[in-house]
Image (tube, rainbow, N blue to C red):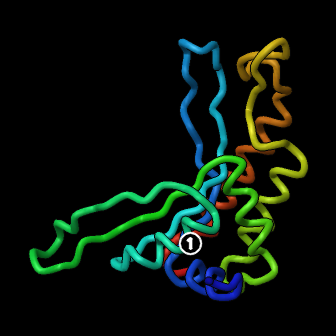
Amino acid sequence: MLTKDYIAGFTDGEGYISIRKVKPVRKQGDISPRYNPVFYIGNTNEKILKEIKKVYGGFIHKRKANIKRNWKIYYSLTIVGPKAFSVLEDLKNHLIVKKHIAEKILEYKKYFGWKSYKRGNQYKGNHTIPKEILKKRNEIYEWCKNANKRGL
């Protein structure tokens, strides 16, 4: 069984955590983008990603490295939405390098929830969300994007 410290260390070294901005889907009545948390780990060792998937769920994708002919096949584990929040909540005290990003994403959840809209008998489409909330969501998205830049 993998420990939280091990998974957090693996995430610090091989992972990416952020907020993903999704363009509005006009057919669904959206007029504003949606923002979803994303937890991603990539590696050439599929076995370790399968072990992490057993703990947190998600999807594993196989990617062919086409940069060099002799490179190994690359695998990625992706967790999006409320499950990503759960992973970050579970690992936040064990992360070192990416802890500040995890905390910012959890702040997003705390103040704005994980969805940009609700379904059912409640409001639909992003047009019902106040502009100041959409502005704050975009600020957090941009902050995460800058925090994840290479070389920083």
**Residue 104's image quarter?**
bottom right
Point out residue 14 in the picture as x, y percentages from the top left corner. 49, 79
**Residue 44's image quarter?**
bottom left
Residue name at image x 81 percent, y 29 percent: 131
Residue name at image x 78 percent, y 74 percent: 92
Please identify the quadrant where the C terminus is shown.
bottom right
Please identify the quadrant where the N terminus is shown.
bottom right
Mark 1 surroundings: few (<14), some (14-19) or many (≥20) residues within 10 A: many
User: Residue reaching furthest left?
Assistant: 69
Point out residue 134 in the picture as x, y percentages from the top left corner. 77, 35
Residue name at image x 9 percent, y 75 percent: 69
User: Residue reaching furthest front?
Assistant: 1
Point out residue 10 in the picture as x, y percentages from the top left corner. 56, 83
Front-lying residue, 55 or 147: 55
Give the vertical position of 57 relative to 147 (above or below).
above
Q: Secondary structure at mark 1?
A: helix
Give the vertical position of 48 relative to 116 (above or below).
below
Residue 4 appears left or right of 48:
right
Residue name at image x 56 percent, y 72 percent: 52
Front-lying residue, 100 or 5: 5
The residue indicated by pointer 1 is: 52
Callout 1 amino acid? Ile
Point out residue 121 in the picture as x, y percentages from the top left corner. 83, 12
**Residue 144's image quarter?**
bottom right
**How many discs appear?**
1
